[in-house]
Image: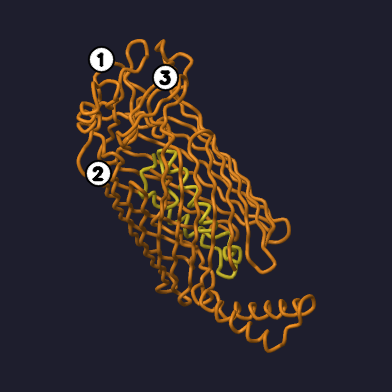
Chain colours: A yellow, B orange
Amino acid sequence: MALMLLTGCAAVQPWEKGEFAREDMQLGAEALDLALDDHVYFSKEGASGGRSFSGGGCGCN
Amino acid sequence: MQLNSAAPFCEQTPLQASPPRTSQSGIAAAVCLSSLAMIGFDAAATETPVSAAQVLEEGTQQVEDKGLLARLIDGWEIDAALLWYREDARVQAIEGVLSGVRALSDSESVSAKIVLDSLSGASASGAAAQQRLQTFTRPSGKGEYQVAAGETPLDDTFKDTRLSLSAGWQKTLDSATKVNAGVYGSKEFDYLSLGMSGGIEWGFFKDNTTVSLSGALGFDVFDAVGGRPVPLSTMAIRKDFADEEAFWQAFDATRQRGVGDKRIGEMMLGVTQIISKSTLVQFNYGLGYSSGYLNDPYKLVSVLDSSGNATHYLYESRPDSRLKQSAFVLGKTAFNLGVAEYSYRFTHDDWGLDSHTLEGRYRHYFSGKKGPYLQLHLRAYRQYGVDFFTPYLQGGESVAPHISADYRIGDMDTWTLGLKTGWRLKDGDEIAVRLEYYRQQPRGDAASLEGLKGLELYPELNAAMLQLNYSWN
């Protein structure tokens, strides 16, 4: 079923992907905002990661 | 002892890499020359006339001076951010980030990032509020601090500065395969963290589907102030001892020798799928295992008598390993004058902590895709705490091998509301300002003990974040 989903979605041709070249459509867009947010949430909540690695990196008292 | 960068190892890989930029040194020199010429003409019009030869000579000198800087940043795309974070009566932090990416060729790039943050204040210690003054020994043992009746105990004298450096490399091997690698290190007063990561991604079905697999290894060292407390040992407080010598003997007995280290291994499997001309979705499954010293050496659990009055305080005790899993799904949709990003994350770990996170951002451009724009950010987070969370213990009750009253691993709900605006300057640089409000509401059973009536066992937290971003283009 996953394969059917993937192949079914493969209808977008390379010349139809203009929107995906936009800077704001990149998965890493606003990387600094995301990193700073993760930083805050890591130190205030018990879960982390998901979008990228949760990592280590502090005592976070 | 610091706010942490939660994703130190991994730089998200853009679905479609930006085309490499042309060398900026020539442009910089041209801008420099034209600016100098303008300055020269203005000066001639308003001040003492300057000869053309003088202008040329001074101009050449300044171009040479600027040449070094231009060479250093030649080809780098640089972004900077400054964040000011402020909680009501607790932590305040200022964090600066400088990040750069440089294309080495059409298929290869490197990146680097420097983060410097300064923090003061601390989260709640875990000890329960009381109807009378409480006295605690500082982590170093060299002093005490007192918490007024009705107040949430916390040591607000914490101060720390953290420096973090990271670097990455990415290469496109062929039309369908990309690899990346990174290293990371951060140092604060009592904590050292080192890490490395690597990943590979493959494109399928005309690049409509991308599968990625990545891994990271980390090694952290916790050199706690005053030494690491022995888990479940009782905090030594001066008033309970006849003299300093007796106090220090008791204090030393609560400390373990050496530093605490933590080893971290993580892997992530991701699938990104283009599902229409304007929408893509991403699925990530993450698995992480950490082992070693996982306690927070500054956290306590109050032991209360039958009336609810604290008789003493124990240092918390957490398991020495943790297995975490996460499932993350994200969608992005492009509009003519905007872009929307929406995600859901579920996490689960073998400490019994589960969480659900819903998050969305919507950006609206007022005039074309270069801005100015206004962006709304909403986030809702629900956490079901670890199995060993306990807001306090009662005297006479047997103590479990693992206990913690750290509200951050208890039950809680949090909300974030943010607004961001940005625009492109005349020279192509971009500037943005972001303001966020964060509210945290721990959940828990109401205290039944008489001495805790009317006290806030699960205090709320409100925080404001103000951020300034600048991108050089």
In which chain is the residue bearing label 2?
B
Q: Are marks 3 and 1 in contact (CB under 8 Å)?
A: no
Residues tagged by mark 3 and mark 1 found on one chain of the structure: yes
Residues tagged by mark 3 and mark 2 found on one chain of the structure: yes
> According to the image, label 2 marks what residue?
B292
Mark drawn on residue B133: 3
Give the quarter of the figure containing the C terminus of chain A: top left
Quarter where residue B366 is shown: bottom right
Neighbour class for label 2 at 10 Å: few (<14), some, many (≥20)? Answer: some
Left or right side of B435 for B265: left
Residue at the image position 45 percent from the left and 47 percent from the top: B328
Residue at the image position 48 percent from the left and 35 percent from the top: B90
Residue farthest to the front, as pictured: B48
Visible in this render: residue A1? no
- Alpha carbon distance from label 3 to label 1: 23 Å
Residue type at mark 1 is: Gly
Please tell me whether mark 3 or mark 2 is closer to you in this view: 3
Please report whichever mark, 3 or 2, sits nearer to the chain's N-terminal start. Answer: 3
Mark drawn on residue B396: 1
In which chain is the residue bearing label 1?
B
Quarter where residue A42 is shown: top left
Residue in the foreground of this view, choosing between B170 and B77: B77
Residue farthest to the bottom, as pictured: B53
Please report whichever mark, 3 or 1, sits nearer to the chain's N-terminal start. Answer: 3
Neighbour class for label 3 at 10 Å: few (<14), some, many (≥20)? Answer: few
Residue type at mark 2 is: Gly
Residue type at mark 3 is: Leu
Residue at the image position 54 percent from the left and 53 percent from the top: B82
Please tell me whether mark 3 or mark 1 is closer to you in this view: 3
- Against B446, is A43 above or below? below
x and y, in percent, of residue B415 in the image: 54, 37
Q: Are marks 1 and 2 in contact (CB under 8 Å)?
A: no
